[in-house]
Amino acid sequence: MSGGVDSAVAAARAHEAGHDVTGVHLALSRNPASYRSGARGCCTIEDANDARRAADVIGIPFYVWDLSERFHEDVVEDFMDEYAAGRTPNPCLRCNERIKFAAVLDRAVGLGFDAVATGHYARLRTGADGLVQMHRAVDQGKDQSYVLGVLDQTQLRHSLFPLGGSTKAEVRAEAASRGLLVADKPDSHDICFVADGDNAGWLREKLGDRAPNHGGPILDESTGEELGRHDGTYAFTIGQRKGLRIGRPAPDGKPRFVLDIEPVSGTVLVGSRDRLAVGGLTAIQPRWCGAAPSLLAGPAVTVQLRAHGDEHRAEVRVDDGTVEVELLDPAYGIAPGQAVVVYDGTRVVGSATISVTRRSG
Amino acid sequence: MSPGVHYLDHAATTPMVPVAIEAMAQHLRDVGNPSSLHASGRNARRVVEESRETIAQALNCRPGEVVFTSGGTEADNLALKGVHWARHAADPRRTRILTTAVEHHAVLDPLVWLAETGAAEVELLPVDSTGRLEVGALAAAIERDPASVSLVSVMWANNEVGTLQPVEDAVALAGTHGIPVHTDAVQAVGAVPVDFAASGVDALTLTGHKVGGPYGVGALLVGREVEVTALVHGGGQERDIRSGTIDPPAIAGFATAVELAVKQQAEHAARVGELRADLVRRVIQAVPDAHLHGGAPDPLGVHRLPGNAHLGFPGCEGDSLLMLLDARGIECSTGSACSAGVPQPSHVLLAMGCDDDQARHSLRFSLGHTSTQADVDAVVEAIGPVVERARAARM
């Protein structure tokens, strides 16, 4: 129970369905005194209180679990390492993979619980083969199956997503009718451990000497011409357009985008949008929701490359621990470190971490 | 208390005794501000003054030495800040405040604040492995530069592990230099004999809800000759030390509870002391590597509070144990303060020499006036399976 409306309604539904529910708020910040004031949908003392009050209204026990050390090691450190290496991580996936459905689930199961329920928008059903399947939520705009694509079969067997069949609007209305004060609370959008959504500023402060560089040239990818300087490659991600301090426009007048990042040399390469087009990618460290596939092809096979991103038709080949994805619909601005989540229709097949992209532009 | 619940967290708070509820209820329909001059005001004032006399009698101080506050934390803040500011103003050399490393946060935090704002230097004196202040360390700290010591604060009994502190030694050491001594006695009143005059302390904190009285009311017993700078200024009530409209019903409830607690102290101590002994013996039987923290247990409460049993369960996390027991209707505490709702390892256990792990694997059971053999039996029956589960859940 984050203190947001989704987890509150999820808890209420699970309780009403007859499950023996205990609400848990995760304290993930190592320094509780540094919680930002106010409520931002997760993480602050006010959010913890919102969660507590929701538990009161629902009538379930409530505890706060301190997972700040684990969270720092498994999610925050990983976030820093990835940016330092020139990749673009998605910490929410890491958190689901290692904290919410691992550390929390392990502790819960150890204490005698059977499952972890969350307010994520995703649907679970059991297939004909007896395996638990995860599908996209009914509300396509809110669908969070992408960030859950890291869950394996064991984790799915111990998960519950009560909101998958509802729209956000329905959930808010239900919260109001249940007397949950968080019905109108705005959703959180930023990364929970980065105040004000300023990833670059946060990284600058936290990386310190660990930053691979503190500045370097911004080069035109086709001409090699130096167009400007930056203060650290970790502040950039492939496909980024804003924040490029280049004095003059491109000769063709089109906007420039980050095409590549070289942390070792401290170079950021930029170019026009068509240069961003990616036709294929290689991904590693796959995690499969059910059986590991070897080849997925056909009109129902798609991949999603960022949270709330487009579905791209694709052909997926799995060989040992490597996933080769050929994009039948090109994607733009895909960065190593991001997750590729593979779908067969609405069913999540699994996910892997992008290691190499092959540009088609 | 709900049926089926076994409440063993009396150190946190204890149910109001029926006579205190009656006393309070009796006055809730009265009207009259005790500061008003008319008959209604005087009647309200009378309730307050009779309560004051009752408390003074129970704790052996003069009625004029009783200053009513909103509770123990306010009384501690008033004593520490108020006495220090006055002492320092009288002699700027008086910059040091000496206290133990095991005080409650209501004492530690005001002192930390005074230190951080540059108003004082605070020295936390060490305790031994039972949690008892090392008197030698206090003596050395005073002797180093007696003129610089503003005040000494030593709790009467520790709230977590129950250890009784050498208050009389502190008074003797400080007294030779005219240094005032404050004691937080919120856990001690009603559990062990507390005699303000005999103890020689200059200021003593007590609170209503720990002795079967209501929340929101407490008192600082403070010698008439002790200078105290007020925290709360206003209408000048309570000797100008603590302004604010006095709460007659709460105070009536408070006084009734204190009177009863003191009157029944010996009998209460013997009764819960026996229950506690039974609990400790049988818990250790059920979980052989469990161990007791704090001073040696004894029914008369010479070394530790008679109702306190602070136990360590190796291989477990205290908050897992607490959750599992809570689910079975057994209520106790991990004895640590909460920061943002997240339990931190107990500073008391750390000061006693426990490491982080040991500090986290403990539970405090505290018995009170409503505790019965059934409560003890419930803990004993549950503790074995609960500890096993908590060990399995260890991350």
Image (cartoon, helix red, strand yellow):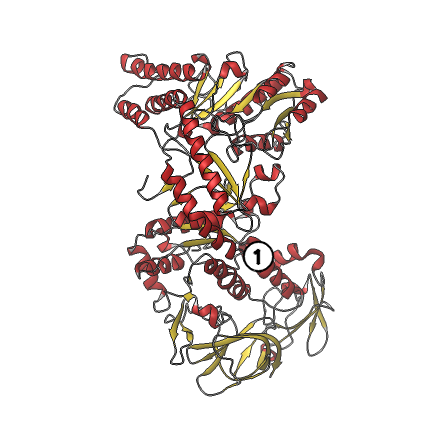
Q: Secondary structure at mark 1?
A: helix
Q: Position of residue A206 (x, y in %)?
A: 64, 55
In terms of image quadrants, where is residue B85?
Answer: top right
Q: Chain of mark 1?
A: A
What crowding class fits label 1: few (fewer than 14 Cα within 10 Å), some (14-19), or many (20 or more)? some
On screen, B102 above or below B84? below
Q: Position of residue B49 (x, y in %)?
A: 37, 14
In this view, the residue in front, B47 or B298, is B298
On screen, A130 above or below A216? below
Q: Count of labels shown?
A: 1
On screen, A233 above or below B135? below
The residue shown at (55%, 65%) is A94
Three-letter amino acid code at disc 1?
Answer: Arg
In this view, the residue in front, A118 or B186, is B186
Residue A38, visible in the rendered structure? no
Write down the residue under mark 1: A70
The residue shown at (44%, 32%) is B274
Q: Position of residue A310 (x, y in %)?
A: 48, 76
Q: Is residue A189 left or right of residue A230?
A: left
Q: Is residue B225 left or right of residue B175?
A: left
Q: Quadrant of the C terminus of chain A?
A: bottom right
Residue extending farthest to the right is: A265
In this view, the residue in front, A10 or A357, is A10
Q: Quadrant of the N terminus of chain A?
A: bottom left
In terms of image quadrants, where is residue A344?
Answer: bottom left
Residue A152, visible in the rendered structure? yes
Q: Is residue B140 left or right of residue A30?
A: right
